[in-house]
């Protein structure tokens, strides 16, 4: 890094370890450099303080720590979210769930939304941002995660439409909702040691470990889903890229025979939409 002291040199060094977008993100965060500066100030020198901070960033990235955990923030659905070691790092695949809900949600209705295992709150907060008449409940077993979700709700202007409860899934939920959403842990326990360091070292195991078969959370939630979902309501779940058939089977065993699926950017079925046979009205 000692030789990478111009904007151009530093940019090229960063791209050896990061994507182009992430390299520009680091330059903006640490050195206050925008994309245009890569052209207009390419031969300018970067001050020593910024260089030292960027060198530390690169060392942590090489060690497997994602930029989001270094900076404590991540963008999701175009919104800023604080993240920490207590929450799952929001990922682009999860935006498929937001798209699925918005495809059929009536933006004019005063909908009620329950987010099970809310983590950073990115799912619920993004939905409330898009649905101005909706209100939501964020449930999580982790007090640290709930504290971060509160911070993110306030940051994104939806705090007054949120309630936060500490709950092991729906254990402390005492009402039914129009929409239930969840991105539960779905990775098999024996697969976790094989995950990339950026995941297994820096995302909470509680948010990753889905048990021996990766399906424990779905079994628990599906067995009680009819109690927290209003007639005519819908539930949306993120699933692993290879879990569609097994999770669909579990949902049918729980009498949710009406199922819609949504694919992620890579073409894998990533989200399942469930609604019960006793729903009212059309889909």
Image (cartoon, rainbow, N blue to C red):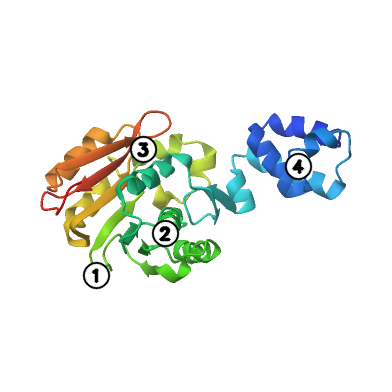
| Mark 2 crowd level (few <14, some 14–19, many ≥20, 10 Å Cα) | many
Residue 197 seen in the current view: yes
Q: Position of residue 174 (x, y in %)?
A: 24, 70
Question: What mark, if any, has residue 190 been given in the picture?
Answer: 3
| Residue positioned most to the front | 108
Q: Position of residue 136 (x, y in %)?
A: 36, 64
| Front residue of 93 and 185 | 93
Residue at horizontal 48 percent and vertical 54 percent from the top = 87
Question: What mark, if any, has residue 128 been given in the picture?
Answer: 2
Question: What mark, if any, has residue 21 been given in the picture?
Answer: none
Q: Secondary structure at mark 1?
A: loop
| Mark 4 crowd level (few <14, some 14–19, many ≥20, 10 Å Cα) | some
Q: Which residue is mark 1?
A: 174
Q: In the rendered view, would you say 125 is above or below 99?
A: below
Looking at the rendered image, the disc whose residue lies closer to the viewer, 3 or 2, is 2
Question: What mark, if any, has residue 55 been given in the picture?
Answer: 4
Question: Spatial distance from mark 4 to mark 3, Cα to Cα?
Answer: 35 Å
Looking at the rendered image, the disc whose residue lies closer to the viewer, 4 or 2, is 2
Q: Earlier in the sequence, mark 3 or mark 2?
A: 2
Question: Spatial distance from mark 1 to mark 2, Cα to Cα?
Answer: 21 Å
Looking at the rendered image, the disc whose residue lies closer to the viewer, 1 or 2, is 2
Question: Spatial distance from mark 4 to mark 1, Cα to Cα?
Answer: 50 Å
| Front residue of 256 and 166 | 256
């Amino acid at each position: 890094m000692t030789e990478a002291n111009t904007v151009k040199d530093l940019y090229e060094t960063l791209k050896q370890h990061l994507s182009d977008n992430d390299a520009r993100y680091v330059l903006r965060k640490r050195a206050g450099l925008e994309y245009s500066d890569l052209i207009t100030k390419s031969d300018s020198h970067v001050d020593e303080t910024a260089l030292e901070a960027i060198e530390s960033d690169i060392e942590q990235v090489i060690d497997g720590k994602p930029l989001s955990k270094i900076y404590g923030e991540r963008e999701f659905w175009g919104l800023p979210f604080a993240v920490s070691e207590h929450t799952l790092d929001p990922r682009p695949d999860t935006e498929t769930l937001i798209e699925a809900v918005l495809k059929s949600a009536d933006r004019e209705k005063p909908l009620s939304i329950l987010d099970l295992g809310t983590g950073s709150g990115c799912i619920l907060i993004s939905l409330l941002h898009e649905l101005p008449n909706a209100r939501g409940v964020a449930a999580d077993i982790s007090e640290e995660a709930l504290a971060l979700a509160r911070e993110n709700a306030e940051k994104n202007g939806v705090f007054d439409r949120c309630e936060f409860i500490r709950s092991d899934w729906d254990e402390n939920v005492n009402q039914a909702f129009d929409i239930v959403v969840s991105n539960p842990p779905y990775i098999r326990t024996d697969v976790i040691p094989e995950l990339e360091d950026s995941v297994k070292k820096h995302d909470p195991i509680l948010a990753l470990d889905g048990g021996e078969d990766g399906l424990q959370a779905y079994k628990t939630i599906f067995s009680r889903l009819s109690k927290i979902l209003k007639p005519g309501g819908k539930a949306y779940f993120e699933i692993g890229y290879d879990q569609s058939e097994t999770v669909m089977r579990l949902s049918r065993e729980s009498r949710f025979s009406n199922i819609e699926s949504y694919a992620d950017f890579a073409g894998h079925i990533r989200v399942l939409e469930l609604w019960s046979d006793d729903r009212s009205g059309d889909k």
